[in-house]
Amino acid sequence: MSGSTFTVSNLGMFGIDYFTSIINQPNSAILSVGAIVQKPVVKNGEIVVGNTMKLTLACDHRTVDGATGAEFLQTLRGYIENPVTMLV
């Protein structure tokens, strides 16, 4: 690996629901993507079966402020929940 700054680790494809990755140098952050799991969720006031996925972001706080990392996760969540917004 040379010159990278961000890594995505997808153990979800192996059925792992949730995990936290370790940042490798020279990266500033790593996004851990878990498996999609069906769980009860509330939609329009009713309990239905919904697909959920856990994302974990680990940041090197020498280069990435925690608030900036949280904003990134909020934006990513919005795109995953409403993919059409990526086209706007």
Image (tube, grey):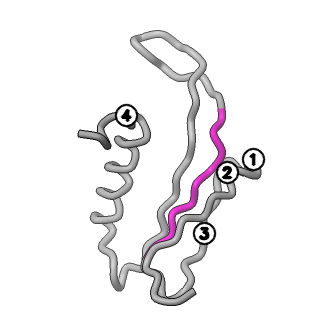
Q: How far apart are the alpha carbons under marks 3 and 2? A: 12 Å
Contact check, label 3 and label 4, Cβ < 8 Å:
no
Q: Is residue 10 above or below residue 36?
A: below
Residue 72 included in the magenta stretch of the image? no
Question: Disc count in the image?
Answer: 4
Sooner in the amino-acid sequence: mark 1 or mark 4? 1
Residue to which mark 2 is pinned: 12
Q: Badge 3: how crowded within 10 Å, few (<14), some, or many (20+)?
A: some
Secondary structure mainly formed by the magenta segment: strand
Q: Residue at x 28, y 64 (%)?
A: 67
Spatial distance from mark 3 to mark 4, Cα to Cα? 26 Å
Q: Which residues are magenta?
A: 29-37
Residue 88, compared with residue 8, is above or below; it is above
Q: In this view of the protein, which residue sits in the foreground, 8 or 64?
A: 8
Q: Looking at the image, which is closer to me, 15 or 60?
A: 15
Q: Which mark is residue 21?
A: 3
Say whether marks 2 and 1 touch (CB < 8 Å). yes
Write the residue at 37% across / 42% down: 79
Residue at 43% across, 79% down = 5
Residue 10: percent from the left, percent from the top?
A: 63, 58
Q: Which residue is mark 4?
A: 82
In which quadrant of the rendered view does residue 82 lie? top left
Give the secondary structure at mark 3.
loop
Give amino acid for label 1: Gly
